[in-house]
Amino acid sequence: MRKPCANLRKRSKNPQNNPLVSVIVPVYNVEQYLDECLNSIRQQTYENLEIIVVEDCSTDNSLNTFFKHSEDPRVKLIQHEKNSGLSAARNTGIDAAKGDYIMFVDSDDIVQLSLIE
């Protein structure tokens, strides 16, 4: 059974009532898990999110699975030109993040719906 898992880091000391949270999801060959993972993030009770999916040159249908979620304006895709690994994918997400907080979710995890509050 997959367990809820994520780390939340504060990026700024700017207190807000509704801060933007950047959720970074590195993706590599996880087509069988990605749909449930992204659904669990998109259905969070806290809605002020940007969901940054960093696709690291998967050889399966992970990218096609992602496109089912691209109608949500909070979901953004960044594609690596070559496979660079988990750390590089996370760093790419950090560079693109606009949130006051950053959170990492592995693409084979399902998070609890109230995780971000």
Image (spheres, rainbow, N blue to C red):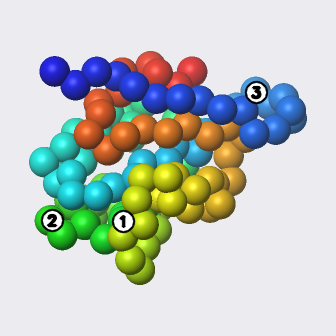
Name the mark nearer the viewer: 1 or 3.
1
Placement of the N terminus among the 4 image quadrants: top left
The nearer-to-camera label among 1 and 2 is: 1
Residue drawn at x 29%, y 30% is 110
Closest to the observer, 87 or 14? 87
Q: Nearer the viewer, residue 4 or 66?
A: 4
Amino acid at dot 3: Asn
Front position among marks 2 and 3: 2
Sooner in the amino-acid sequence: mark 2 or mark 3: 3
Q: Which residue is mark 3?
A: 17
Residue 9, disc: none
The C terminus - image quarter: top right
Name the residue located 22 percent from the left edge and 25 percent from the top edge.
2
Residue position marked by numbered label 1 in the rendering: 56
Q: Position of residue 96 (x, y in %)?
A: 62, 61
Q: Residues within 10 Å of mark 1 (few under 14, many from 20)?
A: many
Q: Earlier in the sequence, mark 1 or mark 2?
A: 1
- Which residue, as the protein is rendered here, is positioned at the far right? 14
Disc 2 secondary structure class: loop
Residue type of the residue flagged with mark 1:
Asp
Task: Report which residue position mark 2 lands on.
Answer: 61
Q: Is residue 23 above or below residue 77?
A: above
Q: CA distance from mark 1 to mark 2?
A: 12 Å
Q: Residue furthest bottom?
A: 81
Identify the amino acid type marked 2. Asn
Question: What residue is shown at x 41% (from left), y 80% (from top)?
Answer: 81
| Residue 71 appears in the figure | no
